[in-house]
Image (cartoon, rainbow, N blue to C red):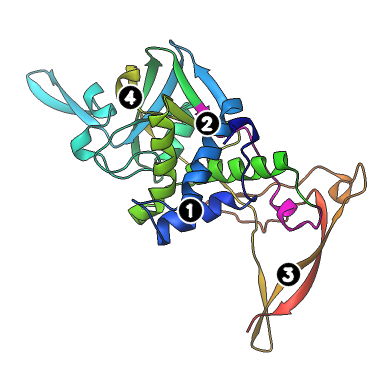
Amino acid sequence: MNASKQKFSSPDAFRDFEHSVLHELRYVRAAATDNFLATVLATSRTRNIELKAGRSLWRAQLGNGWFAEEQGGIRIDFRGAHWPERMKPVAEKAADGRVNPRGIICLYLSTRLETAVLEMRPLIGSYVSVAQFQVRKNARLIDCSRDQFDPLARISQKPLTSKAVEKAVWSDVNRAFSKPAARGDDSLDYVPTQILAETFKNNGFDGIAYKSSYGEHGFNVALFDVAGADPINCALYRVDDVVVQTSQHDQYFIENGQVIRNVVTDVRPLPKGWTPSGGPPPTVRISADSQTQPKPPGERSVVLAKKRRR
């Protein structure tokens, strides 16, 4: 098939692929899965970036090491950052991740120190060792973060162009890589992104860049070759506070013992220049001593109707 004319079957192509490799065929792939992966590669040509040698990136690890000093003939142990060998993964201890399967290592890095720390999901009061890494040689990456697709467009009655479909699929790909790994995750949850990563690796790419779920400006980079970057310094940090920003995705009401939810019945463009209450969009921050109910604005007016679910 001509790569320049290869197109995704629908805006839900990634979700169909995900369902297939999780619940139908994994090691012997369906024709639709092979076609999806071929289309991913064909459309990746506009999503190549070069990570320059000498670029600084960050990697965090929970916990700390110890070092000892003698003061007045007394040995005193001090808490310190992990030693350099602890800041790189080793195959014997490599668990499943979004990019790597168990036993096959890759180097997860972040573009910001704060992002690297947040990716560890630390508890308040915990210690985190953070190393600054330097990229050793130019690396060719797949940039999954370029496409941000409005979910409401999926339910719009207006047909999507092939470019919009491509954008929707790559937005789902980025979201899959960006999804925070929970401590209780089943390793099977990582299979779709692991397959994508190995497809990129097998086709000559050196790694993947994707948006972090933590913070507006943070991005992550996964290098397939752990020798592609080395630590140049490492420091120990204590987590003093964590601020969480939320957006509401669902709400139900209880009336006469029945659960009622709002459902979308129509989507319409907003008037030009519209802002909520004439002001900037509200933000929501939750801290240890206060909580406010989110009330995010949309870029489209959404008509809601109450619907009884049970």
Q: Which residues are magenta?
A: 142-158
Q: Say what secondary structure mark 1 lies in.
A: helix
Using a 10 Å C-alpha cutoff, classify the residue at mark 1 as few (fewer than 14 neighbours), some (14 to 19) or many (20 or more). many
Left or right of 189 on screen, residue 262: right
Q: Quadrant of the N terminus?
A: top right
Inspect the image, locate mark 1, and give the three-letter code of the amino acid beneath it.
Answer: Glu
Precedes in sequence: disc 3 or disc 4: 4
* Residue identifier under label 4: 225
Precedes in sequence: disc 2 or disc 3: 2
* Marks 2 & 1, CB-CB < 8 Å contact: no
Precedes in sequence: disc 2 or disc 1: 1
Closer to the camera, 137 or 126?
A: 137
Image quadrant where residue 281 sits: top right
On the image, the x and y values in percent for residue 216 come to 61, 35
Query: Looking at the image, which residue sits at the far bottom?
Result: 256
Inspect the image, locate mark 2, and give the three-letter code of the amino acid beneath it.
Answer: Phe
* Residue identifier under label 2: 219
In this rendering, which labeled residue sits more in front, label 3 or label 4?
4
Question: Looking at the image, is 83 positioned above or below residue 189?
Answer: above
Residue visible at 71% across and 42% down in the picture: 162
- Label number found at residue 18: 1
